[in-house]
């Protein structure tokens, strides 16, 4: 047995709650993206924000797909289980600490506050 065998696993209820939170966040981000696209003149800052929003939506959709195929909570590289505390703080996490130096490490960044829409 390894230490990872003793880590708590997300329950069905935990996964459902996380799915609901991620779907809600995706819905809000898509709504914000649509508003930005409706603006005729997009400044460089807004264009960067729109790209970041689209990247965040893609990361959320990837996490939702992992939940659906029971791969949520596993490193996408080595398949080791990620810790529940890490997933609670970083629900978009895809990599364990050992594999975390991969190019898609961005998915481990903390959730950011969504900008106020003016």
Image: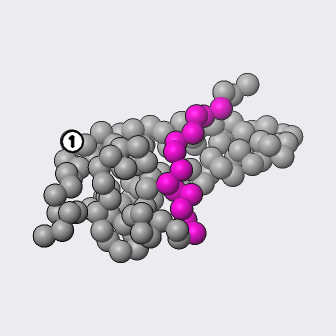
Residue 89 screen position, x and y as percent: 41, 43
- Which residue is depicted at the point 69% across and 52% down? 51
Q: Image height check: is 97 above or below 90? A: below
Q: How many marks?
A: 1
Element marked by disc 1 = helix
* In the image, farthest residue toward the bottom: 78
- Which residue is depicted at the point 28% across and 63% down? 81
Residue 54 screen position, x and y as percent: 62, 51
Q: Image height check: is 26 above or below 3? A: above
| Bounds of the magenta segment | 103-115
Q: Looking at the image, which is closer to me, 57 or 90?
A: 90
- Which residue is depicted at the point 52% across and 45% down? 110
Residue 68 seen in this snapshot: yes
Dividing the picture into quarters, in which one does residue 76 lie? bottom left
Does residue 48 appear to the left or right of 62 in the view shown? right
Dividing the picture into quarters, in which one does residue 32 lie? top right
Is the image coloured rainbow, by chain, by secondary structure, or in one colour? one colour
Residue under numbered circle 1: 13
Q: Looking at the image, which is closer to me, 93 or 14?
A: 93
Residue 108 sits inside the magenta stretch:
yes
Residue 55 sits inside the magenta stretch:
no
Residue 27 seen in this snapshot: no
């Amino acid at each position: 047995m390894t230490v990872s065998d003793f880590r708590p696993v997300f329950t069905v209820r935990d996964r459902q709650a996380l799915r609901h939170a991620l779907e809600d966040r995706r819905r809000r981000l898509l709504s914000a993206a649509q508003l930005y696209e409706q603006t005729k003149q997009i400044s460089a800052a807004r264009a960067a924000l729109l790209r970041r929003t689209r990247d965040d939506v893609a990361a959320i959709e990837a996490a939702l797909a992992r939940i659906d195929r029971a791969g949520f909570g596993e490193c996408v590289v080595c398949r080791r289980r990620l810790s529940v505390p890490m997933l609670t703080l970083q629900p978009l996490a895809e990599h364990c600490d050992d594999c975390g130096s991969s190019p898609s490490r961005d998915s481990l960044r903390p959730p950011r506050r969504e900008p106020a829409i003016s």
